[in-house]
Image (tube, rainbow, N blue to C red):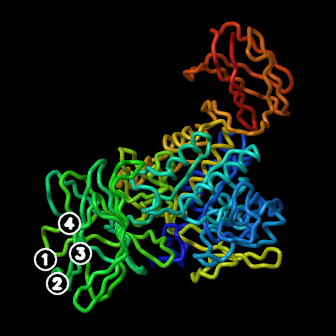
């Protein structure tokens, strides 16, 4: 049964009593099991020395999944509760409360009650990305990764602050960072993937941060409307209020350097207009919070108009219409030369609803416009550098011996994105995924799959569905890739995940607007990462086991291997990525002649039984 949560700003989730496709089944679907078995790999990869940052709500800092698989070593480094004002705030910030280290986190127990009350979503998502399982089969993907948690307040600046704080901590730790975001809004930044959040994501991505976002859960509702005006024209549509909302937030956007006008229509049960507002123009009107009289009813509505957004030069409108049970409502739009888009989303008491209501063509109005499900990916998933994740059900063998599952989740949002940027990028298991539940939540009323007792307290595991579950799965896979090769750029990590995604009859049937490049394949991604030359250095400190002297090099250089590994592969690549030299090393000091190479910059890749290291060298 579909269960909406008006308490969470994340994409809506689905609580399912019968957990047929659990986290332990998601692992083989995403080929994480092959990584754990280290098939043709130097060793098992577990996300060690990689940090996963989770921006969410409902963190139970005490949950045993945040220890390692032996339930000994605690893996949450820090947490920042942006809602709790008792302090102390993180260095460089003036609000919220930061917890540093195991003792402070366990004493705090959980994030504070906020506009989402004592939630649970963050604990569930983090458990998928890297939970240790707490002795159960419900282990996350990157079980040795460390965590940063931010209970985030969804304003532009506070989201940006969360990312910057995570990046600063990762730099202090000298480790790579993957940021997992199982939330999204259709009126934060712009729907074409531009805005202050997008700019900051691109800046941090260039610095090595890997961003992973859920694609959204509006794949089964016609909440988007589009019309291309090539001449002066007027179009109309009817819109419905989203489930469990106090109204509709209709986000409208025109094409670059265009304009449009709109009017709100009050309709009777036969869809005849009983009242209407004046036309409001993106060229001449300003913001208002007002009302319309329709017979004996009063309809409250407000609008915010932006004539030309500074990031994309597009006109945009945020129209909020508050619920009225006695009327139906329509939208009339007029323009002359404009590619017009609109999205109908829930308005809830926290202002953060993100599930859709429909645009419809009444049967008695054949010239009106119906909605569709396209362009369903919102901020931050619509930003080009984000790895945007759709959801599918895990493929598994049923008790009868037949294969089951594998299809796209009906709720998984459709692409494409704007500017010919394909979205979503990839798909991962997101249907009936069992993971950890916050033991402090007061908002979960579903059934439990399993319970464990740890330090005298009962902790539970529950089954949820949503792209919220698929995104942290891919974040965990990204952590495995970065452990295999910590010198990859964020763009290389994304490229590796997309290039190694696998296809089957379901991906072929539904196509890229649902599955992106295909289903995530952790095993092939790790293999490809091991064979890829990563030339970036992102660490504030260096933990390399290798030194090269001298550098620049005239002819002979010496490579010192400060490791107990005896079999070390040394490969040298030119700036085009072509391998020009290969040699075998052992522990201690090894000599290598580079006299046969032309002067210039090269990359030395050193692969041992445990890790990959990369050195930039110059031949004179």
3 or 4: tag closer to the N-terminus:
3
Circle 4: element type: loop
Q: Specify whether 543 is left or right of 470.
A: right
1 or 2: tag closer to the N-terminus:
2
Q: Which residue is mark 4?
A: 369
* Mark seen at residue 277: 3
Q: Are marks 2 and 3 in contact (CB under 8 Å)?
A: no
Q: Looking at the image, can residue 499 be seen?
A: yes
- For the residues labelled 2 and 4, the Cα–Cα distance comes to 17 Å
- For the residues labelled 4 and 1, the Cα–Cα distance comes to 12 Å
Q: Specify whether 437 is left or right of 267.
A: right
Circle 3: element type: loop
Q: Which residue is mark 1?
A: 364
Q: Are marks 3 and 4 in contact (CB under 8 Å)?
A: no
Q: Position of residue 230 (x, y in %)?
A: 16, 51
- For the residues labelled 3 and 1, the Cα–Cα distance comes to 22 Å
Residue mark closest to the camera, 3 vs 1: 3
Residue mark closest to the camera, 3 vs 4: 3
Report the label total. Answer: 4
Residue mark closest to the camera, 2 vs 3: 3
Q: Which residue is mark 2?
A: 270
Residue in the picture at 32% in, 87% down: 325
Q: Position of residue 542 (x, y in %)?
A: 78, 36
Q: Are marks 2 and 4 in contact (CB under 8 Å)?
A: no
Q: Are marks 1 and 2 in contact (CB under 8 Å)?
A: yes
3 or 1: tag closer to the N-terminus:
3
Residue in the picture at 54% in, 56% down: 29
Residue in the picture at 55% in, 64% down: 154
Circle 2: element type: loop
Q: Quadrant of residue 440?
A: bottom right
2 or 3: tag closer to the N-terminus:
2
């Amino acid at each position: 049964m579909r269960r909406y949560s008006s308490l969470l700003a994340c994409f809506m989730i689905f609580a399912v009593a019968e957990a047929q496709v659990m986290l332990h089944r998601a692992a083989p679907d995403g080929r994480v099991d092959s990584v754990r078995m280290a098939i043709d790999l130097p060793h098992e990869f577990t996300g060690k020395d990689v940090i996963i940052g989770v921006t969410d709500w409902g963190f139970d800092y005490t949950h045993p999944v945040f220890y390692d698989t032996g339930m000994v070593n605690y893996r949450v480094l820090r947490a920042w509760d942006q809602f709790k004002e008792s302090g102390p705030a993180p260095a460089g910030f003036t609000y919220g409360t930061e917890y540093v280290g195991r003792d402070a986190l366990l004493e705090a127990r959980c994030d504070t009650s906020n506009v989402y009350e004592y939630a649970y979503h963050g604990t569930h998502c983090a458990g998928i990305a890297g939970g240790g399982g707490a002795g159960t089969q419900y282990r996350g993907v990157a079980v040795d990764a460390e965590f940063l948690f931010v209970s985030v307040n969804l304003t532009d600046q506070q989201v940006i602050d969360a990312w910057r704080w995570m990046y600063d901590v990762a730099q202090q730790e000298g480790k790579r960072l993957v940021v997992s975001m199982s939330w999204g809004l259709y009126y934060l930044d712009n729907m074409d993937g531009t805005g202050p959040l997008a700019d900051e994501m691109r800046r941090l991505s260039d610095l090595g941060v890997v961003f992973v976002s859920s694609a959204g859960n509006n794949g089964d509702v016609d909440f988007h409307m589009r019309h291309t005006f090539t001449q002066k024209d007027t179009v109309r549509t009817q819109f419905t209020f989203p489930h469990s909302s106090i109204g509709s937030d209709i986000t409208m956007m025109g094409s670059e350097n265009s304009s449009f006008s709109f009017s709100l229509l009050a309709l009777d049960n036969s869809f005849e207009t009983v009242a209407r507002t004046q036309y409001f123009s993106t060229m001449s009107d300003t913001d208002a919070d007002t009302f319309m009289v329709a017979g004996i009813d009063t309809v409250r509505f407000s609008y915010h108009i932006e004539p030309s957004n500074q990031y994309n030069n597009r006109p945009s409108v945020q129209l909020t219409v508050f619920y009225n049970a006695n009327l139906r409502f329509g939208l009339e739009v007029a323009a002359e030369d404009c590619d017009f888009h609109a999205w109908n989303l829930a308005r809830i008491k926290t202002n953060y609803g993100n599930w859709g209501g429909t645009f419809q063509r009444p049967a008695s109005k054949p010239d009106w416009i119906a909605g569709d499900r396209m362009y369903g990916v919102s901020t931050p998933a619509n930003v080009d550098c984000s790895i945007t994740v759709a959801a599918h059900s895990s493929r598994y063998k049923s008790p009868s011996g037949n294969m089951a599952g594998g299809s796209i989740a009906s709720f998984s949002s459709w692409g494409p994105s704007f500017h010919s940027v394909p979205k979503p990028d990839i798909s991962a298991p997101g249907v009936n995924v069992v993971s950890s539940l916050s033991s402090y939540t007061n908002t979960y009323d579903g059934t439990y799959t399993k319970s464990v007792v740890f330090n005298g307290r009962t902790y539970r595991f529950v089954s949820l569905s949503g792209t919220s579950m698929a995104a942290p799965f891919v974040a965990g896979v990204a952590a495995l890739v970065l452990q295999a090769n910590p010198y990859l750029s964020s763009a290389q990590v994304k490229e590796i995940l997309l290039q190694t995604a696998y296809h089957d009859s379901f991906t072929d049937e539904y196509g890229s607007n649902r599955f992106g490049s295909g289903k995530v394949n952790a095993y092939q991604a790790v293999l490809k990462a091991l064979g890829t030359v990563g030339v970036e250095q992102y660490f504030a400190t260096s933990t390399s086991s290798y030194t090269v002297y001298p550098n620049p090099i005239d002819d002979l250089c010496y490579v010192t291997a400060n490791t107990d590994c005896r079999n070390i592969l040394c490969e040298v690549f030119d700036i085009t990525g072509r391998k020009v030299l290969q040699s075998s090393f052992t522990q201690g000091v090894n000599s290598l002649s580079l006299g046969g190479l032309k002067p210039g910059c090269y990359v030395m890749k050193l692969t041992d039984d445990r890790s990959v290291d990369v050195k930039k060298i110059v031949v004179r």
